[in-house]
């Protein structure tokens, strides 16, 4: 472990990153604002501002009005200086999203297509979807930082290979095989970890929380100190394999019985509408008896999982994924069920809420990795 002092070059890089991040978080700011806030010398700040401007990362075309003297130059960061893209592939869908440096969505696409990594046509469709979103978002090859691919399985630490893909039987697949028709920098991500990453990144107030992804499979992510905590070999947060039905439960793809995944995956609802989740929720809204019965069972099982997470971690719980996109108007009922299980009197309205990315967390989280990597390398 390194314990020595930083080199002169490392100090320069650290100062540059601090200045850029300060502008990103507080802009528009003046040069003097930066000097005071970061306790850096004026020459150091000036030199780094020139570097950032030269590389097209900040803008100085505006001014901050002063009441007692000459207006100061206002520095802001350029959100679309670079872009990143994310892809989420699940059992029946393919999601693609393009983000700017602020995490803002520049373009997106969702296609209903059956997962099959052994089908060349499927791989081509993935590549075509990436190119289409890239073109519509106006992203150039030079501006694209990379394409993250979020998958329903555990991946290696370097994001190059699927190490556990029993969900859809694709263990061992590499990023080269999956991204055969995506000619950019590629990295694979575990879907729920990617989702947890964007939730934490999007809101720095989320310091400690548990994210639950409600999609074709159930996953989770632990957020600690506004960072993703993966645990040993990135296996942390796998609440999908928490036993919810200890007796008489369905067999899970993991080989065990009664896992949360078997009772809260999307299929438990949209089988009734031939895989169309939007249509299912419309039927639920219309009071369809079968839809209502399915939802009652779903909420009861989900409330048990949320209660367990609250008892273990005593942190905020954030819901996302495909079902999370539609759950908004049913949150009061879900919170009531969670409250009924809590022995301490905690109110779920104070700690249980929805993700702001409305079902795009997995693809957005895969993209945001490249934004973080870029910012760390400035």
Image: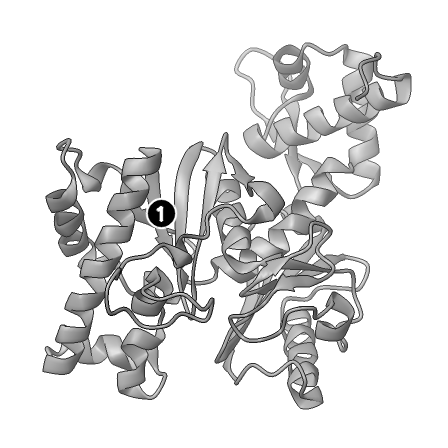
Image coordinates of residue 163 in percent, x first then y, are 65, 61
Q: Can residue 315 be seen in the rendering of this structure? A: no
Where, by quadrant of the figure, is residue 89 drawn? bottom right
Q: In this view, does 54 lie to the left or right of 63?
A: right
- Camera-side residue: 295 or 307? 307
Where, by quadrant of the figure, is residue 85 drawn? bottom right
Is the C terminus in the top left, top right, bottom left or bottom right quadrant? top right
> Residue at position x 14%, y 44% from top?
341
> Residue at position x 64%, y 69% from top?
171
Q: In this view, does 317 lie to the left or right of 227?
A: left
Q: In this view, does 140 lie to the left or right of 360?
A: right
Dot 1: what SS?
strand
- Camera-side residue: 32 or 193? 193
Furthest-front residue in this view: 247
Where, by quadrant of the figure, is residue 326 drawn? bottom left
Picture layout, residue 126 above or below residue 229: below
> Residue at position x 62%, y 17% from top?
33
Is the N terminus in the top left, top right, bottom left or bottom right quadrant? top right
Residue beneath disc 1: 318
Q: Can residue 87 be seen in the rendering of this structure? A: yes
Q: How crowded is mark 1: few (under 14 residues within 10 Å), some or many (20 or more)?
A: many
């Amino acid at each position: 472990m390194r314990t020595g002092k930083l080199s002169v070059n490392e100090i320069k890089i650290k100062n540059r990153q601090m200045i850029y991040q300060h502008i990103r978080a507080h802009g528009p700011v003046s040069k003097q604002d930066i000097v005071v806030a970061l306790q850096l010398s004026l020459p150091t700040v000036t030199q780094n501002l020139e570097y950032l401007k030269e590389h097209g990362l900040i803008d100085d075309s505006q001014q901050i009005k002063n009441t007692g003297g000459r207006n100061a130059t206002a520095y802001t960061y350029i959100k679309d200086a670079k872009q990143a893209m994310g892809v989420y592939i699940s059992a029946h869908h393919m999601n693609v999203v393009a983000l700017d440096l602020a995490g803002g969505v520049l373009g997106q696409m969702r296609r209903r297509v059956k997962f099959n990594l052994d089908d060349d046509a499927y791989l081509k469709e993935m590549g075509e979807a990436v190119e289409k979103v890239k073109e519509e978002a106006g992203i150039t090859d030079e501006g694209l930082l990379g394409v993250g691919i979020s998958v329903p399985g555990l991946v290696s630490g370097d994001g190059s290979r699927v190490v556990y893909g029993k969900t859809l039987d694709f263990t061992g697949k590499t990023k080269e095989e999956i991204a055969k028709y995506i000619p950019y920098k590629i990295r694979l991500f575990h879907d729920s970890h990617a989702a947890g990453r964007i939730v934490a990144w999007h809101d720095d107030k989320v310091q400690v929380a548990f994210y639950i992804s409600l999609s074709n499979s159930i996953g989770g992510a632990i957020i600690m100190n506004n960072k993703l905590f993966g645990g040993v070999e990135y296996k942390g947060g796998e609440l999908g394999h928490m036993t919810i039905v200890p007796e008489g439960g369905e067999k899970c793809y993991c080989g065990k019985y009664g896992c949360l995944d078997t009772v809260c995956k999307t299929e438990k609802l949209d089988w009734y509408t031939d895989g169309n989740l939007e249509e299912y929720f419309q039927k639920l809204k219309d009071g369809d008896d079968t839809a209502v019965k399915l939802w009652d069972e779903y909420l009861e099982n989900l409330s048990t999982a949320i209660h367990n997470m609250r008892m273990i971690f005593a942190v905020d719980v954030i819901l996302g994924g495909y079902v999370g996109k539609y759950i908004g108007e049913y949150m009061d009922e879900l919170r009531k069920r969670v409250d009924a299980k809590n022995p301490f009197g905690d109110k779920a309205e104070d700690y249980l809420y929805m993700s702001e990315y409305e079902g795009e967390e997995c693809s957005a989280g895969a993209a945001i990795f490249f934004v973080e990597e870029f910012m760390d390398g400035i």
